[in-house]
């Protein structure tokens, strides 16, 4: 995820405790199964009653497990940023507690608003009280990673951004996004959809360092998928351009048939798309999964379908497939019953919460961070009950499957493979990236070495 930098907010890092709602919570009202038969999609619920006891670690008592979660909703330049992540975890905590918690211990969640620039303040607060961080997503996690590692705050984030966090110690994700391997399914699948355009694509450059790194990696992924990319030499100022028409004209003169952007759907990017239309070209437009969402949908509807050529690759099921994918319907039912926002990043947070809960359940009464690291490192097939393609959290490896969505008007549909609710999988989709694109140094265990210390928790095996 690539997002804008901004001024600091004094809201960042302020924790808000989320107390269990109990069996009469909105999660129960959503109609989700409770008790021994409870499921999330195809996943047997890891939550339930039990007789776990003991103050086994920080944040764990006879009756409670304290976890931190959060997002950047207080970011002043984009209010509500990633709010769907915190909403999802809050709802999943109630869903789990309504079944009895984890082996009888109730989950008490504390929400941390990193407000973009306050991730380190949030992590400093969490270090003093939480058992683990779960399902969170901080866009500037590079500022908090040193603090997290230093206090042995094991984490199951919803997403990571910085290289040191993506391959960080004591970190496991429901949908891993490591620096040294990439899921290239979108490029392989676009090649099947548009075989005549293999030499007609180019990448949109940027002055933002993180986007430069991402674009370099994407270039290697596209080439591995057989694309002979153009090099039109277009770089856009991340802070915006007075006019995007000269850049669009350059792409027209270069003869592009397709463009990739590593930037998210923000106003500057939309202005660039308008300039492409003004220049008389309508290339296939490709982007990360962040383009699948309301921002693109609403802008396209208000601008006469200028983004009808948008394609976004995903390893998650589409929300539009809820009627045929039970896990997506369960996610919607649980979060909407709490009045929460639903979106792709919310599903990522949900997957990571369920991964955390599955490992915590396996630890039983002896709930320690060491046990959690041992259990998480042993989970090698994970799809959160069908919420996304199968990943390998234990080895920090992405999926080898994917699908492509496309936009028409205000509606997203699955463009590839043709059958809605299915993925296409192939081992060739997993691409080892060049070390020059990593942005950090990895040890032989593929763990980022920058903040390592002798006291980090490693899997016992």
Image (cartoon, helix red, strand yellow):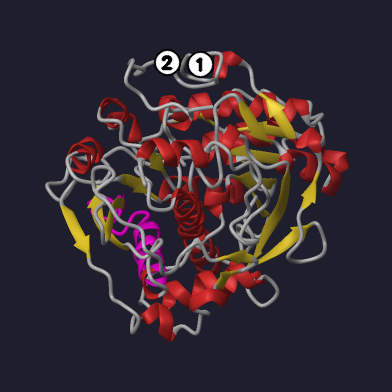
Mark 2 or 1 closer to N-term? 1
Task: Describe residue 101's horizontal placement relative to residue 35 as left or right.
Answer: left
Which x, y percent locates residue 336? 43, 76
Quarter of the figure with residue 429: top right
Residue at image coords 36%, 63%: 51
User: Is residue 187 among the parts visible in the rendering?
Assistant: yes
Quarter of the image with the C terminus in it: top right
Q: Nearer the viewer, residue 221 or 133?
A: 133
109 lies above or below 239: below
Which x, y percent locates residue 184? 70, 36
User: Is residue 160 among the parts visible in the rendering?
Assistant: no
Q: Is there CB contact under 8 Å for labels 2 and 1?
A: yes
Label 2 crowd (10 A; few <14 / some 14-19 / many >=20):
some
Residue at image coords 58%, 67%: 304
Task: Describe residue 16's horizontal placement relative to residue 347 as left or right.
Answer: left
Label 1 crowd (10 A; few <14 / some 14-19 / many >=20):
some
Quarter of the figure with residue 412: bottom right
Q: Which residues are magenta?
A: 70-96
Q: Spatial distance from mark 2 to mark 1, Cα to Cα? A: 6 Å
Does the stretch in magenta take in 93? yes
Q: Which element is circle 2 on?
A: loop
Which x, y percent locates residue 81? 34, 54
Residue at image coords 87%, 41%: 195
Task: Describe residue 132's horizontal placement relative to residue 184 as left or right.
Answer: left
Disc 2 target residue: 449
Does the stretch in magenta take in 411? no
Q: Which element is circle 1 on?
A: loop
Disc 1 target residue: 442
420 lies above or below 246: below
């Amino acid at each position: 995820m690539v997002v804008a930098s901004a001024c600091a907010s004094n809201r960042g890092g302020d924790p808000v405790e989320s107390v269990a709602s109990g069996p009469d919570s909105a999660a129960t009202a959503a109609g989700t199964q409770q008790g021994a038969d409870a499921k999330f999609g195809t996943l047997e619920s890891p939550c339930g009653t039990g007789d776990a006891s003991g103050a086994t670690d920080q944040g764990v008592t006879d009756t409670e497990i304290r976890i931190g979660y959060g997002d950047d909703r207080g970011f002043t330049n984009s209010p509500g940023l990633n709010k769907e992540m915190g909403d999802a975890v809050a709802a999943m905590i109630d869903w789990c507690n309504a079944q009895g918690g984890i082996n009888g211990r109730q989950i008490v969640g504390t929400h941390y608003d990193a407000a973009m620039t306050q991730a380190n303040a949030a992590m400093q607060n969490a270090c003093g009280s939480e058992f683990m961080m779960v399902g969170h997503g901080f866009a500037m996690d590079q500022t908090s990673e040193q603090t997290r590692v230093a206090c042995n705050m094991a984490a199951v984030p919803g997403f990571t951004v910085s290289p040191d966090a993506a391959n960080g110690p004591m970190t496991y994700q429901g949908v891993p996004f490591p620096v040294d391997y990439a899921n290239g399914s979108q490029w392989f699948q676009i090649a099947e959809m548009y075989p005549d355009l293999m030499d007609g694509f180019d990448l949109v450059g940027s002055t933002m360092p993180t986007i430069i790194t991402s674009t370099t990696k994407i270039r290697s992924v596209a080439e591995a998928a057989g694309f002979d990319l153009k090099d039109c030499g277009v770089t856009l100022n991340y802070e915006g351009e007075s006019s995007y028409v000269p850049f669009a004209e350059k792409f027209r003169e270069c003869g592009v048939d397709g463009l990739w952007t590593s930037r998210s759907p923000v106003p500057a990017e939309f202005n660039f798309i308008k300039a492409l239309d003004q220049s008389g070209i309508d290339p296939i437009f490709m982007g990360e999964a962040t383009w699948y969402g309301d921002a693109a949908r609403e802008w396209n509807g208000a601008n006469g379908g200028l983004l009808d050529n948008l394609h976004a690759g995903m390893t998650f099921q589409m929300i539009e497939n809820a009627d045929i994918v039970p896990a997506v319907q369960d996610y919607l039912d649980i979060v909407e019953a709490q009045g929460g926002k639903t979106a792709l990043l919310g599903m990522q947070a949900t997957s990571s919460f369920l991964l955390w809960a599955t490992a915590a359940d396996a630890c039983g009464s002896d709930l320690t961070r060491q046990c959690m690291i041992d259990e998480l490192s042993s989970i090698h097939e994970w799809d959160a009950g069908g919420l996304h393609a199968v990943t390998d959290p234990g080895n920090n490896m992405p999926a080898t499957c994917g699908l492509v969505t496309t936009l028409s008007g205000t509606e997203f549909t699955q463009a590839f493979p043709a059958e809605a609710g299915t993925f296409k999988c192939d081992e060739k989709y997993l691409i080892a990236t060049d070390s020059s694109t990593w942005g950090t140094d990895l040890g032989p265990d593929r763990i980022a070495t920058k903040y390592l210390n002798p006291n980090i928790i490693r899997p016992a095996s």
